[in-house]
Image (cartoon, rainbow, N blue to C red):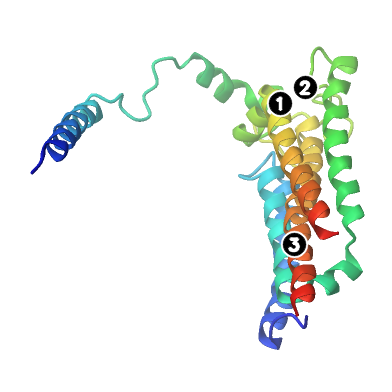
Amino acid sequence: MKGMSTIVKTTANISFPFILIYGLYLIAHGHLTPGGGFQGGAVVASGLVLMLVAYNTEWISKRIKESHLSIFESLGALSFVILAFLGIIFGTAFFSNFLVGTETLFGGIPLNGAADINTGGIIPLMNFAVGLKVIAGLFAIVYIMAHFISKKEEKIA
Amino acid sequence: MNKRNLIAFAFLTVVGVFLIFSTFMMHPFGDPNEQAMDQYIIDNTVDETGANNGVTAVVFDYRGFDTLGEATVLFTAVAGVILVFRRLKK
Protein backbone atom coordinates (compact mmCIF):
# COMPACT_ATOMS: atom_id res chain seq x y z
CA MET A 1 0.00 0.00 0.00
CA LYS A 2 3.02 2.29 0.12
CA GLY A 3 3.91 2.10 -3.53
CA MET A 4 7.47 1.58 -4.68
CA SER A 5 10.74 2.94 -3.27
CA THR A 6 11.77 6.59 -3.09
CA ILE A 7 14.14 6.16 -6.04
CA VAL A 8 11.30 5.00 -8.30
CA LYS A 9 8.98 7.73 -7.06
CA THR A 10 11.58 10.46 -7.65
CA THR A 11 12.39 9.17 -11.12
CA ALA A 12 8.71 9.00 -11.98
CA ASN A 13 8.16 12.53 -10.64
CA ILE A 14 10.98 13.90 -12.78
CA SER A 15 10.09 12.08 -16.00
CA PHE A 16 6.31 12.44 -15.77
CA PRO A 17 6.09 16.08 -17.04
CA PHE A 18 8.35 15.29 -19.99
CA ILE A 19 6.26 12.26 -20.96
CA LEU A 20 3.12 14.39 -20.67
CA ILE A 21 4.54 17.19 -22.80
CA TYR A 22 5.82 14.76 -25.42
CA GLY A 23 2.45 13.04 -25.67
CA LEU A 24 0.55 16.31 -25.95
CA TYR A 25 3.03 17.47 -28.60
CA LEU A 26 2.39 14.30 -30.60
CA ILE A 27 -1.37 14.95 -30.42
CA ALA A 28 -1.18 18.65 -31.27
CA HIS A 29 1.24 18.16 -34.18
CA GLY A 30 -0.52 15.10 -35.53
CA HIS A 31 -1.10 16.66 -38.94
CA LEU A 32 2.51 17.90 -39.31
CA THR A 33 4.90 15.31 -37.89
CA PRO A 34 4.69 11.53 -37.46
CA GLY A 35 2.22 10.69 -34.73
CA GLY A 36 -1.35 11.58 -34.06
CA GLY A 37 -4.19 11.09 -31.64
CA PHE A 38 -3.69 7.38 -31.06
CA GLN A 39 0.06 7.50 -30.57
CA GLY A 40 0.13 10.62 -28.40
CA GLY A 41 -2.75 9.34 -26.32
CA ALA A 42 -0.88 6.08 -25.72
CA VAL A 43 2.22 8.05 -24.61
CA VAL A 44 0.24 10.19 -22.13
CA ALA A 45 -1.64 7.16 -20.84
CA SER A 46 1.63 5.29 -20.22
CA GLY A 47 2.92 8.32 -18.28
CA LEU A 48 -0.16 8.13 -16.07
CA VAL A 49 0.36 4.39 -15.69
CA LEU A 50 3.95 5.11 -14.60
CA MET A 51 2.60 7.26 -11.76
CA LEU A 52 0.08 4.55 -10.89
CA VAL A 53 2.86 1.95 -10.67
CA ALA A 54 5.29 4.17 -8.77
CA TYR A 55 2.73 5.30 -6.21
CA ASN A 56 -0.27 3.19 -5.31
CA THR A 57 -3.87 2.89 -6.39
CA GLU A 58 -5.24 4.91 -3.47
CA TRP A 59 -2.84 7.79 -4.14
CA ILE A 60 -4.07 7.95 -7.74
CA SER A 61 -7.73 7.49 -6.84
CA LYS A 62 -7.60 10.58 -4.62
CA ARG A 63 -6.64 12.61 -7.71
CA ILE A 64 -8.35 10.88 -10.64
CA LYS A 65 -11.79 9.33 -10.23
CA GLU A 66 -13.04 6.58 -12.49
CA SER A 67 -16.06 8.71 -13.41
CA HIS A 68 -13.71 11.41 -14.76
CA LEU A 69 -12.14 8.87 -17.11
CA SER A 70 -15.56 7.69 -18.28
CA ILE A 71 -16.63 11.27 -18.94
CA PHE A 72 -13.44 12.07 -20.87
CA GLU A 73 -13.66 8.93 -22.97
CA SER A 74 -17.31 9.54 -23.83
CA LEU A 75 -16.56 13.20 -24.56
CA GLY A 76 -13.80 12.21 -27.00
CA ALA A 77 -15.95 9.66 -28.79
CA LEU A 78 -18.92 12.03 -28.93
CA SER A 79 -16.94 14.97 -30.31
CA PHE A 80 -15.37 12.65 -32.90
CA VAL A 81 -18.77 11.52 -34.16
CA ILE A 82 -20.26 15.02 -33.98
CA LEU A 83 -17.35 16.38 -36.06
CA ALA A 84 -18.01 13.62 -38.58
CA PHE A 85 -21.70 14.52 -38.75
CA LEU A 86 -20.88 18.23 -39.12
CA GLY A 87 -19.23 17.18 -42.36
CA ILE A 88 -22.68 16.26 -43.70
CA ILE A 89 -24.20 19.58 -42.67
CA PHE A 90 -21.44 21.99 -43.72
CA GLY A 91 -19.60 19.87 -46.26
CA THR A 92 -20.42 17.21 -48.77
CA ALA A 93 -20.25 13.88 -46.98
CA PHE A 94 -19.65 12.04 -43.71
CA PHE A 95 -16.10 12.91 -42.51
CA SER A 96 -15.62 15.55 -45.19
CA ASN A 97 -13.06 18.19 -44.27
CA PHE A 98 -15.34 21.25 -44.21
CA LEU A 99 -12.93 23.55 -42.34
CA VAL A 100 -10.06 23.55 -44.79
CA GLY A 101 -9.65 26.81 -46.69
CA THR A 102 -12.21 28.73 -44.62
CA GLU A 103 -9.61 30.88 -42.80
CA THR A 104 -11.16 30.07 -39.41
CA LEU A 105 -9.69 27.87 -36.69
CA PHE A 106 -7.34 25.33 -38.28
CA GLY A 107 -8.65 26.45 -41.66
CA GLY A 108 -5.53 28.07 -43.08
CA ILE A 109 -4.39 27.31 -46.58
CA PRO A 110 -0.87 25.85 -46.76
CA LEU A 111 1.52 28.10 -48.66
CA ASN A 112 4.08 26.55 -51.03
CA GLY A 113 3.06 23.05 -50.04
CA ALA A 114 4.07 23.45 -46.39
CA ALA A 115 1.42 23.17 -43.70
CA ASP A 116 1.74 24.80 -40.28
CA ILE A 117 -0.01 24.43 -36.94
CA ASN A 118 -3.09 26.36 -38.09
CA THR A 119 -3.89 24.23 -41.15
CA GLY A 120 -5.49 20.86 -41.53
CA GLY A 121 -9.20 21.61 -41.15
CA ILE A 122 -10.87 19.04 -38.94
CA ILE A 123 -7.79 16.79 -38.75
CA PRO A 124 -6.26 18.50 -35.64
CA LEU A 125 -9.66 18.65 -33.96
CA MET A 126 -10.17 14.93 -34.60
CA ASN A 127 -6.66 14.29 -33.29
CA PHE A 128 -7.63 16.06 -30.06
CA ALA A 129 -10.87 14.07 -29.80
CA VAL A 130 -9.15 10.72 -30.42
CA GLY A 131 -6.27 11.71 -28.11
CA LEU A 132 -8.65 12.46 -25.26
CA LYS A 133 -10.42 9.19 -25.90
CA VAL A 134 -7.23 7.11 -25.99
CA ILE A 135 -5.78 8.78 -22.86
CA ALA A 136 -8.94 8.10 -20.86
CA GLY A 137 -9.57 4.68 -22.37
CA LEU A 138 -6.11 3.16 -22.00
CA PHE A 139 -5.63 4.57 -18.51
CA ALA A 140 -9.09 3.40 -17.45
CA ILE A 141 -8.23 -0.20 -18.36
CA VAL A 142 -5.06 -0.24 -16.21
CA TYR A 143 -6.71 1.78 -13.44
CA ILE A 144 -9.70 -0.53 -13.09
CA MET A 145 -7.50 -3.63 -13.12
CA ALA A 146 -5.10 -2.16 -10.53
CA HIS A 147 -8.03 -1.18 -8.35
CA PHE A 148 -9.41 -4.69 -8.56
CA ILE A 149 -6.05 -6.28 -7.68
CA SER A 150 -5.52 -3.99 -4.67
CA LYS A 151 -9.00 -4.81 -3.34
CA LYS A 152 -8.24 -8.51 -3.70
CA GLU A 153 -4.91 -8.14 -1.83
CA GLU A 154 -6.69 -6.38 1.02
CA LYS A 155 -9.14 -9.23 1.26
CA ILE A 156 -6.38 -11.85 1.37
CA ALA A 157 -4.18 -9.99 3.87
CA MET B 1 11.47 -43.52 -38.33
CA ASN B 2 7.88 -44.66 -38.15
CA LYS B 3 5.14 -43.98 -40.65
CA ARG B 4 3.74 -40.98 -38.80
CA ASN B 5 7.07 -39.15 -38.75
CA LEU B 6 7.62 -39.97 -42.42
CA ILE B 7 4.30 -38.40 -43.41
CA ALA B 8 5.06 -35.35 -41.29
CA PHE B 9 8.51 -34.96 -42.86
CA ALA B 10 7.10 -35.27 -46.39
CA PHE B 11 4.44 -32.68 -45.60
CA LEU B 12 7.06 -30.35 -44.12
CA THR B 13 9.27 -30.71 -47.22
CA VAL B 14 6.41 -29.90 -49.57
CA VAL B 15 5.36 -26.85 -47.57
CA GLY B 16 8.97 -25.69 -47.17
CA VAL B 17 9.75 -25.96 -50.89
CA PHE B 18 6.50 -24.17 -51.68
CA LEU B 19 7.34 -21.33 -49.27
CA ILE B 20 10.90 -20.94 -50.55
CA PHE B 21 9.78 -20.78 -54.19
CA SER B 22 6.96 -18.35 -53.39
CA THR B 23 9.47 -16.13 -51.57
CA PHE B 24 11.57 -15.88 -54.73
CA MET B 25 8.47 -15.18 -56.82
CA MET B 26 7.25 -12.45 -54.49
CA HIS B 27 6.41 -9.04 -55.89
CA PRO B 28 9.36 -6.64 -55.43
CA PHE B 29 9.07 -4.39 -52.43
CA GLY B 30 8.10 -0.77 -53.08
CA ASP B 31 6.85 -1.44 -56.60
CA PRO B 32 3.04 -1.54 -56.52
CA ASN B 33 0.98 -2.70 -59.48
CA GLU B 34 -1.50 0.15 -59.20
CA GLN B 35 0.00 3.54 -58.38
CA ALA B 36 -2.91 5.81 -59.26
CA MET B 37 -4.31 6.18 -55.75
CA ASP B 38 -0.87 6.48 -54.09
CA GLN B 39 0.17 9.17 -56.53
CA TYR B 40 -3.14 11.02 -56.05
CA ILE B 41 -2.68 11.12 -52.27
CA ILE B 42 1.00 12.14 -52.54
CA ASP B 43 0.15 14.93 -54.98
CA ASN B 44 -3.00 16.34 -53.40
CA THR B 45 -2.74 15.78 -49.63
CA VAL B 46 -1.29 19.19 -48.77
CA ASP B 47 -3.67 21.13 -51.00
CA GLU B 48 -6.84 19.24 -50.11
CA THR B 49 -6.42 18.68 -46.38
CA GLY B 50 -3.74 21.15 -45.29
CA ALA B 51 -1.77 18.43 -43.51
CA ASN B 52 1.91 17.68 -44.06
CA ASN B 53 1.55 14.21 -42.59
CA GLY B 54 0.02 12.10 -45.32
CA VAL B 55 -0.68 9.18 -43.01
CA THR B 56 -2.76 11.32 -40.66
CA ALA B 57 -4.54 12.84 -43.64
CA VAL B 58 -5.49 9.38 -44.85
CA VAL B 59 -6.46 8.13 -41.39
CA PHE B 60 -8.57 11.12 -40.37
CA ASP B 61 -9.78 12.49 -43.68
CA TYR B 62 -9.75 10.13 -46.65
CA ARG B 63 -10.45 7.04 -44.55
CA GLY B 64 -12.16 8.62 -41.56
CA PHE B 65 -14.76 5.90 -41.44
CA ASP B 66 -12.05 3.34 -40.69
CA THR B 67 -10.87 5.45 -37.75
CA LEU B 68 -14.43 5.56 -36.45
CA GLY B 69 -14.35 1.75 -36.39
CA GLU B 70 -11.00 1.76 -34.57
CA ALA B 71 -12.32 4.18 -31.98
CA THR B 72 -15.36 1.97 -31.52
CA VAL B 73 -13.13 -1.06 -30.94
CA LEU B 74 -11.23 0.82 -28.21
CA PHE B 75 -14.48 2.03 -26.65
CA THR B 76 -15.88 -1.50 -26.61
CA ALA B 77 -12.67 -2.87 -25.04
CA VAL B 78 -12.75 -0.27 -22.24
CA ALA B 79 -16.47 -0.81 -21.66
CA GLY B 80 -15.91 -4.57 -21.46
CA VAL B 81 -13.04 -4.27 -18.98
CA ILE B 82 -14.99 -1.87 -16.76
CA LEU B 83 -18.06 -4.10 -16.90
CA VAL B 84 -16.19 -7.29 -15.96
CA PHE B 85 -14.03 -5.84 -13.19
CA ARG B 86 -16.77 -3.78 -11.61
CA ARG B 87 -18.85 -6.91 -11.25
CA LEU B 88 -15.98 -8.77 -9.57
CA LYS B 89 -15.11 -5.90 -7.22
CA LYS B 90 -18.25 -6.28 -5.12
Tell me the distance, in whole angstroms, between the alpha carbons under discs 1 and 2. Answer: 6 Å
Tell me whether marks 1 and 2 sit on the same chain: no
| Front one among A65 and B36 | A65
**Is the residue under label 2 in contact with that under label 1 (CB below 8 Å)?**
yes
Instruction: Say which residue label 2 marks.
Output: A95
Where is residue A23 drawn, in percent x and y?
Answer: 71, 55
Relative horizontal placement of residue B29, taking residue B70 as reference (left or right): left
- In the displayed structure, would residue A75 be above or below residue A68? above
**Is the residue under label 3 in contact with that under label 2 (CB below 8 Å)?**
no
- Which amino acid type corresponds to the residue marked 1 in the rendered image? Gly
- In the displayed structure, would residue B77 be above or below residue A90? below
| Front one among B29 and B84 | B84
Instruction: Say which residue label 1 marks.
Output: B64
Residue drawn at point x = 87 percent, y = 56 percent: A66
Q: Secondary structure at mark 1?
A: helix
Which chain is home to disc 1?
A: B
- Number of disc labels: 3
Q: Quadrant of residue A3?
A: bottom right
Instruction: Say which residue label 3 marks.
Output: A20
Tell me the distance, in whole angstroms, between the alpha carbons under discs 1 and 3. Answer: 27 Å
Which chain is home to disc 2?
A: A
Badge number at residue B72:
none
- In the displayed structure, would residue A154 be above or below residue B81? below
Where is residue B88 drawn, in percent x and y?
Answer: 79, 56
Where is residue B82 drawn, in percent x and y?
Answer: 79, 49
Relative horizontal placement of residue B7, taking residue A153 as reference (left or right): left
Residue drawn at point x = 81 percent, y = 40 percent: A129
- Which amino acid type corresponds to the residue marked 3 in the rendered image? Leu
**Mark 2 or mark 3, earlier in chain:** 3
Q: Residues within 10 Å of mark 3 (few under 14, many from 20)?
A: some
Residue that protrudes farthest toward the bottom in the picture: A6
